[in-house]
Image (cartoon, helix red, strand yellow):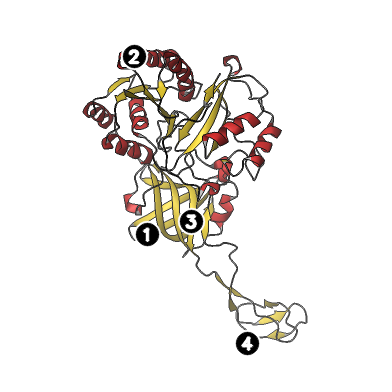
Amino acid sequence: MLLHIGLDDTDSPEGGCTTYIVARLVEELEALGVMFADYPNLLRLNPNVPWKTRGNGAVCLRMEVEPAMEGVVRKMVVDAVEGQAEFQCENTNPGVVFHTGEIPDSLMDFSDRVVQGVVTLEEALRLINDAGGHAIGYKNMRGLIGALAAVGGLQRGDHTFEVLTYRSPENCGSPRMLDEGSVRAMDAALCDATFNNVDPESGRVLIAPHGPDPVLYGVRGETPEAVYRAYEMVKPLEPVERWAIFRSNQGTDAHLRYRSNVDEIEAYSPAIVSGEVTEAPRTIKGGHVIFGLSDETGRIDCAAYEPTGSFREVVRKLIPGDAVRAYGGVREEGSRRTLNLEKMEVLKLAEDVQLVNPACPECSGTMESMGRGKGYRCRRCGHRDSNLEKHPVVVDRGLEVGLYIPPAKAQRHLTKPLSRYGMEKEYMHGELFQPWHGA
């Protein structure tokens, strides 16, 4: 029988990791004789919800098991969650969902909506019941939403892979130890098959997180072969307890699929809005850059925050009249909503026409005003002329039509980097690459 097991919300800001629980389960389940039908599916959910813990990722294991072993498998999974989840954290509310057989369309649709918006626990519970699934939720049970989304998230369209390595427990909480030179060499060798290993602006290595979780590093790429090759090339300076390859929606823009009018956008949801710049960009405290974007239905602030680095310089070059398409997540403060920019497409540039002082008719030097209504005087030769006037000049904007994305260090898990455009692919089920996990 085909068994799908979704897990979510086992971590906290202080530690834990759902993928780590899954990586350990893979070894235990394989020892029981199960046959995995796919790599563990790592599904990044809507990154804008305020109640997420860290990366907002849920995982599904898909396997063939003998019916007589189903009860043993379920108990093994529940024991793993109850033994390793961060229950002491107020915002950690684990969920486990079991589903047998084919995945119905209702669950696939639900998964898409969890990635692209906000859904309710009541809807998840109803769908679990309608699909004949079995669920175990803890505390307020919110983790069931992500667990069910992971079950329904077959990722038949565009997808990527990630090899995740894990630290020995005694090292968790200490600075991660990697040979950064090996990371840069790996990035140079596999730049066409992996992405976001090193930030091109700062040179900072990006594959290692900074929190107290057990992940040592992770490399994302286009194929399991590519990320395994990366695993072979990166040199850790501390023990690797175990590792596993996951198939994921990371780097696919899976959350940014639907375009909306300004009056249709919802709080905490991803949005794509096309319109006209109606208020010039302004820099506020903290270095954040804000501009007003309007369409025929309304107006919204768009924000490029300080961590987006050079992307803010692009935003600062916008002027009223420019046509842009803004991509991001909607933040709500009181009645005011802001679109936090993840990327921006400049569709059309307005002409920036400025009035400039005339050139001197005698020596072509620069003229300066002698005062309102008094004419101009040449700075070079002193020629005076009361009949000259300013004339319009089209200024070079230093900006072109096209797509602009923040540097790698500021990109979200789901954001598709420029290097992945043209790399989109459909999932073709087949034999799993070997080896895809180890300890």
- Residues 423 and 283: in front is 423
- Residues 57 and 54: in front is 57
Kindly identify which residue carries mark 1: 295
**Residue 373 image point, x, y percent:** 60, 81
Separation of disc 3 and disc 4 at Cα?
44 Å
- Depth check, mark 3 against mark 4: the one in front is 3
Separation of disc 4 and disc 2 at Cα?
96 Å
- Depth check, mark 1 against mark 2: the one in front is 2
Q: On the rendered structure, is 6 left or right of 303?
A: left
Separation of disc 1 and disc 2 at Cα?
57 Å
Kindly identify which residue carries mark 2: 69
Look at the numbered discs 3 and 1 and tell me whether their residues touch, using CB distance below 8 Å. Answer: no
Q: On the rendered structure, is 362 left or right of 57?
A: right
Kindly identify which residue carries mark 3: 345
Look at the numbered discs 4 and 2 and tell me whether their residues touch, using CB distance below 8 Å. Answer: no
**Residue 285 image point, x, y percent:** 55, 45
Q: Earlier in the sequence, mark 3 or mark 1?
A: 1
Amino acid type of the residue that numbered disc 2 sits on in the rendered structure? Met
Q: Earlier in the sequence, mark 2 or mark 3?
A: 2
Rendered image quadrant of residue 76: top left
Amino acid type of the residue that numbered disc 4 sits on in the rendered structure? Asn
Kindly identify which residue carries mark 4: 387
- Depth check, mark 4 against mark 2: the one in front is 2
